[in-house]
């Protein structure tokens, strides 16, 4: 089974980056993000309108181009977690986790016995490689990632228990929802928001669980990296297109509108 280079990097204390994909449907976007040097793709099935056939294509293309495919499922439900992993995803991202029990359930859904209850089946889960079942199960449990998102005041309050769950790899902050829950919507400089993030980092450190953050501007991730975050979800496909188009229109208007 293909090695998960994102999981390996995080274990070594290195930072990793990747964009959120919610609009792109073609394999070219996967290839371009890999060529750009990103480590992972945050494939969003919570807010985007992907179907499973499209997701299978994107995931398998990511494996072929050596960029780690991570799928954010719509909710914490076994059929969604299992289907993402059966498509070949090297990890699942679970939104809106607020209790230790939910984090334990996420690990349980994502791991084969004896670590969890995931069922075995499907051709895509190992990139269509033929693997002896015992080896395949062992590799899948070792290489697969479980990422949970903290997006509420309750999630922050429960972070000590969540971070201690065996098999958890990353706690990723959902900044918009967390700021709304804290009563400071969109104010990512507010002391209560910053203090919540410091609490999350402090709780995860003893368990060697990486902490992640989402930003649209790469430069905005600097302060969170300096705080100790290493899973850096950088920009999204729609915003990248908007940024580039806005830049080009501004450049054109500089000379088109002269005279």
Image (tube, rainbow, N blue to C red):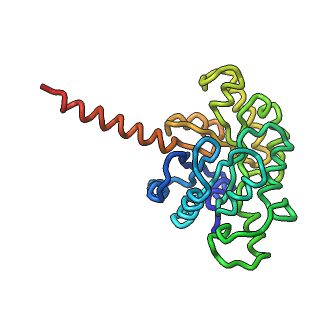
Residue 13: horizontal and vertical position, in percent? 66, 51
Instruction: Tell me which residue sits at (30%, 38%) in the image.
Output: 248
Instruction: Tell me which residue sits at (76%, 42%) in the image.
Output: 204
Q: Is residue 85 above or below residue 253?
A: below
Tally the marks: 0
Residue 245, by quadrant, is top left
Is residue 28 shown left or right of residue 7? left
Is residue 179 shown left or right of residue 241? right
Residue 66: horizontal and vertical position, in percent? 54, 63
Instruction: Tell me which residue sits at (58%, 44%) in the image.
Output: 48
Which quarter of the rendered picture does the C terminus lie within?
top left
Q: Is residue 6 above or below residue 164?
A: below
Q: Nearer the viewer, residue 222 or 96?
A: 96
Residue 148: horizontal and vertical position, in percent? 73, 45
Residue 11 visible: yes
Residue 125: horizontal and vertical position, in percent? 67, 67
Which quarter of the rendered picture does the N terminus lie within?
bottom right
Is residue 63 shown left or right of residue 137? left
Residue 42 visible: no
Q: Nearer the viewer, residue 27 or 240?
A: 27
Residue 9, by quadrant, is bottom right
Q: Nearer the viewer, residue 96 or 223?
A: 96
Q: Is residue 95 above or below residue 111?
A: above
Instruction: Tell me which residue sits at (60%, 47%) in the image.
Output: 44
Is residue 218 shown left or right of residue 133? left
Q: Is residue 136 above or below residue 209?
A: below
């Amino acid at each position: 089974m293909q090695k998960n280079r994102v999981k390996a990097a995080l274990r070594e204390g290195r930072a990793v980056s990747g964009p959120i994909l919610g609009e792109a449907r073609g394999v070219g976007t996967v290839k371009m993000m890999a060529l750009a040097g990103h480590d992972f793709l945050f494939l969003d099935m919570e807010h985007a309108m992907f179907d499973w056939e499209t997701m299978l294509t994107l995931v398998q293309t990511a494996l072929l181009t050596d960029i780690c495919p991570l799928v954010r499922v719509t909710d914490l439900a076994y059929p969604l977690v299992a289907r993402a992993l059966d498509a070949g995803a090297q990890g699942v991202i679970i939104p809106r986790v607020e209790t230790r029990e939910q984090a334990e359930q996420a690990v349980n859904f994502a791991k084969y016995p004896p670590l969890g209850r995931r069922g075995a089946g499907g051709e895509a889960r190992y990139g269509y490689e033929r693997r002896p079942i015992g080896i395949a199960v062992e590799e899948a449990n070792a290489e697969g990632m479980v990422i949970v998102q903290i997006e509420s005041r309750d999630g922050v309050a429960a972070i000590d228990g969540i971070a201690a769950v065996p098999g958890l790899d990353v706690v990723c902050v959902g900044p918009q929802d967390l700021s709304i829950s804290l009563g400071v919507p969109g104010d990512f400089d507010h002391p209560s928001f910053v203090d919540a993030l410091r609490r999350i980092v402090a709780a995860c450190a003893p368990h060697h669980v990486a902490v992640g953050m989402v930003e649209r501007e790469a430069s905005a991730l600097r302060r969170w990296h300096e705080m100790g975050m290493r899973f850096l979800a950088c920009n999204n496909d729609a915003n990248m297109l908007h940024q580039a188009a806005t830049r080009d229109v501004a450049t054109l208007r500089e000379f088109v509108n002269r005279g």
